[in-house]
Image (tube, rainbow, N blue to C red):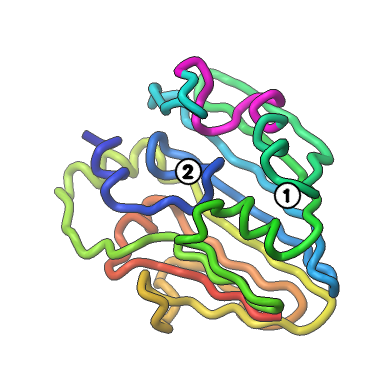
């Protein structure tokens, strides 16, 4: 039931880090952007071991749709010309796996492909990146179920940091791209050379109207 509700409520942020759909997951992203559009993406994601059956990659039922192992990332990088896997680590305990990857990308197009190869949830221009984290989440869910999920996943968080060599601007939108005020429980740095946005995974689930981020640099 939890898996089905999460799957209905969100759309994919990335083809690799499906952090809310098939398992509960915490995700931290750090994007360092150079003037020429190249840069470095650092991701740390926590995959809860309490939910299994997270799917398959390329039709191989033995391979998880979320890349957990080095071989998963090697397969992913092969499809993205110019992207390099700088480092990889994975820590596993009884509760979760914690994966950290560092990737270099040659241009903004490659970064967008890393985040969303379909081009449906991530769009870009020379100095702009738009991400839809949640589509329209106007449905209401059983409060008891939400409370149960919070008891398991309340310390899981989504966060993104963005740094560039010039002053940048972070704008928060709804799922349709319309500018909105920041969610009550989100922590935001919206201007400067280093931008940030963070919010609890369960707080994301309860945002009506969807959520997106637009970064201009």
The magenta stretch spans residue 45: no
174 lies left or right of 41: left
User: Which is more N-terminal, label 1 or label 2?
Assistant: 2
* Residue 67 position (above or below residue 212): above
14 lies left or right of 134: right
Check whether the beta carbons of the residues at disc 2 and disc 1 lie within 8 A of each other.
no
Q: Position of residue 88 (x, y in %)?
A: 76, 33
As measured in the structure, the alpha-carbon distance from the residue carrying label 2 to the one carrying label 1 is 15 Å
Element carrying mark 2: loop
Q: Quadrant of the N terminus?
A: top left
Q: Position of residue 156 (x, y in %)?
A: 48, 45
Element carrying mark 1: strand
Q: Position of residue 157 (x, y in %)?
A: 51, 50
Residue 85 picture quarter? top right
Residues 140 and 217: in front is 217
Label 2 Cα crowd, 10 Å radius (few <14 / some 14-19 / many 20+) = many
Q: Position of residue 125 (x, y in %)?
A: 64, 76
- Look at 77% across and 78% down and name the residue there: 193
- Look at 85% across and 74% down and name the residue there: 35
Residue picked out by circle 2 = 19
Residue picked out by circle 1 = 42
* Residue 164 position (above or below residue 90): below
Residue 51 picture quarter? top left
Residues 112 and 201: in front is 112
Magenta segment, which residues? 61-73
- By secondary structure, the bulk of the magenta-drawn segment is best described as loop
Residue reaching furthest to the top: 62
Residue 33 picture quarter? bottom right
Q: Quadrant of the C terminus?
A: bottom right
95 lies left or right of 9: right
Residues 165 and 118: in front is 118
- Look at 80% across and 51% down and name the residue there: 104
């Amino acid at each position: 039931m939890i898996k089905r509700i999460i799957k209905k409520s969100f759309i994919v942020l990335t083809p690799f880090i499906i952090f809310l759909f098939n398992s509960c997951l915490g995700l931290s992203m750090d994007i360092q952007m150079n003037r020429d559009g190249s840069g470095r993406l650092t991701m740390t994601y926590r995959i809860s071991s309490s939910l299994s059956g997270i799917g398959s990659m390329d039709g191989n039922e033995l391979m998880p749709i979320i890349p957990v192992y080095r071989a998963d990332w090697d397969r992913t990088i092969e499809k993205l010309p110019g992207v390099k896997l700088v480092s990889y680590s994975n820590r596993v305990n009884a509760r979760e796996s914690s994966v950290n990857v560092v990737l270099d990308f040659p241009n903004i197009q490659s970064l967008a492909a890393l985040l969303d190869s379909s081009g449906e949830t991530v769009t870009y221009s020379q100095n702009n990146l738009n991400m839809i984290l949640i589509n329209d989440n106007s449905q209401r869910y059983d409060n008891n179920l939400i409370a149960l999920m919070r008891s398991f996943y309340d310390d899981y968080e989504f966060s993104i940091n963005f740094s560039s060599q010039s002053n940048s601007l972070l704008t928060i939108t709804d799922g349709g791209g319309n500018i909105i005020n920041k969610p009550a429980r989100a922590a935001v740095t919206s201007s400067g050379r280093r931008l940030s946005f963070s919010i609890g995974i369960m707080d994301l689930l309860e945002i009506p109207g969807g959520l997106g981020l637009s970064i201009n640099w």
